[in-house]
Image: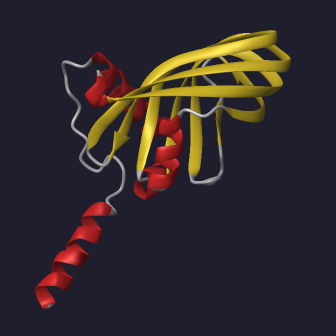
Amino acid sequence: MKRLVVFAMAGLLFAGQAAMSDWQVDPGNSSEVKAQNALRKFRERIPRTQAYFDQAHGFAIFPSVTRVGFGLGGAYGKGVVIQGDQTIGASKYWQFTSGIQAGARNFSMIIFFKDEQALKYFQSGDIQFMGQAGLAVATAGIAGTPAYNDGVAIVTMTRFGLMAEFTVSGAKFKYKPLSDE
């Protein structure tokens, strides 16, 4: 009986590991290398992301998302999805926007999933609607949710560009498991 309890506790500890604890990047996979470089920059420029890594069940990292808008707008980017210490899939991100906006920018984005339910919802690819306001000038511009909302937290970091906005948008994520590639 004691062994069963010990194994159960060890299993719970292992299952509860924080995202990216020992993620090993495949140096031959350019998407993973770009993701690793973006993660390094997030940690340097936005140290508060460490708390999200410590709590997250998994995350999606989009190293480069390009966004253009003038009245109507859109964005596109590709990334990888990490759970525990492994890459579990790839993702594409599309966004359409409408509102007061002008400019173009390129940014990196991390979507943290607090639990398995939030990750599964992301993998389903349902469309999301949101409102946003912001200003990005050159490399200045950082945005994100201050806490988990429905198990998801998003942090973005401007790479370059000039954009001002007050918009309503819809976002679509397409998830492709690694086994399908």
Residue sitting nearer the eye, 103 or 7: 7
| Residue visible at 21% across and 37% down in the picture | 24
Pick the quarter of the image with the N terminus.
bottom left
Residue sitting nearer the eye, 155 or 47: 155
Looking at the rendered structure, the number of numbered marks drawn on it comes to 0
The quadrant holding residue 154 is top right
Give the residue at the far left of this rendering.
Answer: 3
Reply above or below: 80 against 137.
below
Residue 48 visible: no
Pick the quarter of the image with the C terminus.
top left
* Residue 43 percent coordinates (x, y): 43, 40
| Residue visible at 43% across and 31% down in the picture | 41
Position of 86 with respect to 62 (left or right) is left
Residue 163 visible: yes
| Residue visible at 81% across and 22% down in the picture | 165
* Residue 86 percent coordinates (x, y): 26, 40
The quadrant holding residue 101 is top right
* Residue 85 percent coordinates (x, y): 26, 45
The quadrant holding residue 76 is top right
